[in-house]
Amino acid sequence: LIVVTEDMDLPLVTAMLCGVGFLMFLIPIIPGIPIYLLLGIVLGPKAEKIMGGYHWSIAYSTLVGLLLKLAASAFQQGVIGGLCSKFVSVRQAVGINSPAMKSIRIILIEPGFSMSKTALLLGGPDWPTSVICGILKLDL
């Protein structure tokens, strides 16, 4: 993929990877790690040539990954969890009545910040956590 994108501009490669990454984030069984690896492996060398250094290319890839993750989480929460929460298939995909999701629901509805809520939002499963936040009508 590095060879294929070698002659393309950085914004075009970034846009293509963001589109693919966004779609990958919407698939419940795909964690974020393959997406971040893809960004680092493909964008890193591309950005290094343009930005003039390894450190800047890593910073660029990290920023793109962060913005992509935030956009996908907002979409999962607002559209899938918020607008589609009435559909049984969405609730079933999240496992809304499973013991794990019941525990997650209890943690998420606590007002304010807590160590358990922070740990869940940072280390919990991406797709179900974002969607259940939308189902519970939590603030973005």
Image: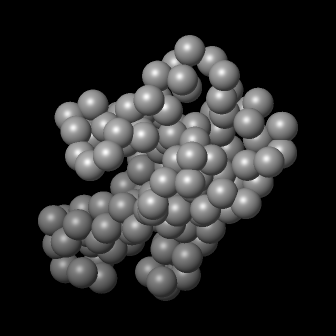
Residue placed most toward the observer, 30 or 139:
139
Camera-nearest residue between 7 and 54: 54
| Residue at left offset 23%, top offset 46% | 113
**Would you place residue 55 above or below residue 89 in this image?**
below
Judge from the rendering whether residue 126 lies leftward or rightward of residue 83; answer left or right.
Answer: left
Picture colour scheme? one colour
Residue 75 at x, y percent in the picture:
60, 62
Residue shown at 42%/47% (left/top)? Answer: 37
Work out which residue is located at the far top of the displayed protein and give it.
Answer: 99
The residue lying at 65 percent from left, 29 percent from top is: 96
Residue 9 rendering spot, x and y as whole percentages: 49, 84
Q: Is residue 54 above or below residue 13?
A: above
- Using the rendered view, name the quadrant where residue 44 is placed: bottom left
Give percent across and percent down for residue 25. 59, 50
- Determine the residue positioned at 73% across, 49% down: 85
86 or 18: nearer the eye?
Answer: 86
Residue 136 pos. (x, y %): 57, 46
Note whether residue 2 is visible. Answer: no
On screen, residue 80 versus residue 107, left or right, reads right
Q: Residue furthest right?
A: 88
Q: Quadrant of the C terminus?
A: bottom left
Answer with the quarter of the image where residue 10 lies: bottom left
